[in-house]
Image (tube, rainbow, N blue to C red):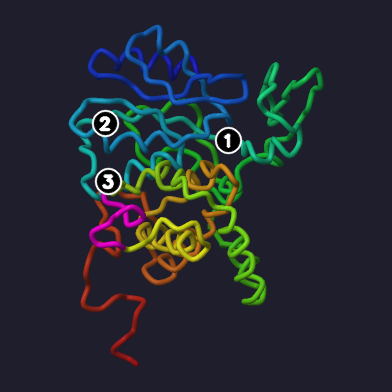
Amino acid sequence: MLEQLKDTIKKALPELDFVIGWGMGFDALHATPLFMYEPEDVDKLVWGPLNVHNLATYLPALKGRKVGIVVKGCDSRSVAELLQENLINREDVVIFGAPCRGTVSLTKIRKVIGNTGLIEDVNYADGTLTVKAEGASHEMALKDIRADKCGYCRFPNAVLSDHFVGEKRAPQVEEDTFEDLAEFESQPFEERRDFWMKEMDRCIRCYACRNACPLCVCRDHCVAQSRDPHWLSQQDGVRDKFMFQIIHATHLAGRCTTCGECERACPVDIPVLLFKRKFTKAIKDTFDYDAGLDPEATPPLLAFKANEDNIKEKEW
């Protein structure tokens, strides 16, 4: 499948400025975004569970250029959402899709092997990732080390693509039941409050969650750094850090595709995706809407209807 994907990209490359995919990073465990300008660049392309980045994050800054992008299912939903909001032009983007088996959580891998900076070799086959580090070999089933988002993935194949290679895969689940959210919300209020106070106390306000998000596009005018108006201070207190995360999640309500980049990018492993999951469920329950499935659709909070189907305000 990888060779077929490379051949497809090479055929399309002369008509494009470049194609964004994944290549190997500083060691065999870390893939990194790869910008392919020439056919020899395409030979560096990799595909598999180490392709953790959502490359759609680059697209808004490239509006007006003719580029290609390789996508997983969740990445393609972000592309569709960017199209909905006219943040990119459809004629400027060529989408290469392939079936995804899930991506790894490097946090989970670190819990198994320790320091991931001393990797000697990595091999993935038959649902098992084998990592050799410091002379020791560690075999880990992908289902045990995959990102949490992959456990409730309904779109392993690109929902939008110009070129799709490989055999399409069945979804992990037919319907997202938000069991992770229900489990958390089953706890008493005091426990939930204390949980977030502890997590926010660890936040270093690096804004990696914001910068990695493909739909968080107002970075030059972010409320976290704006001084006119002055919404938030730069104090290192729990209150301001918690406030930023709430605002971030609110701005993504009805737009978040649950790609998990915010949580993956967090250097201190704060489960910030849980905020977005809460809003995603509210949007689903209220508007019966899933973000990033139809590039022609309008997100519910960017539209107005005098009477929403699921809000019976006239009956109150």
Give the x, y percent position of residue 221. 26, 51
10 Å neighbourhood of mark 1: few (<14), some, or many (≥20)?
Answer: many
Secondary structure of residue under mark 2: strand
When asked about the image quadrant of residue 82, the answer is top left
Instruction: Establish if 307 lies above or below 170.
Output: below
Instruction: Establish if 189 lies above or below 313.
Output: above
Q: Residue furthest right?
A: 136
Give the x, y percent position of residue 294. 31, 49
Q: Answer left or right for 247 relative to 105.
A: left
Q: CA distance from mark 1 to mark 2?
A: 24 Å
Report the residue marked by disc 3. 220
Report the residue marked by disc 1. 101
Report the residue marked by disc 2. 93
Q: Nearer the viewer, residue 133 or 170?
A: 133
Disc 2 residue type?
Val
Secondary structure of residue under mark 1: loop
10 Å neighbourhood of mark 3: few (<14), some, or many (≥20)?
Answer: few
Q: Which mark is residue 273?
A: none
Q: Residue at x 36, y 8 (%)?
A: 39
**Magenta span covers which residues?**
220-230
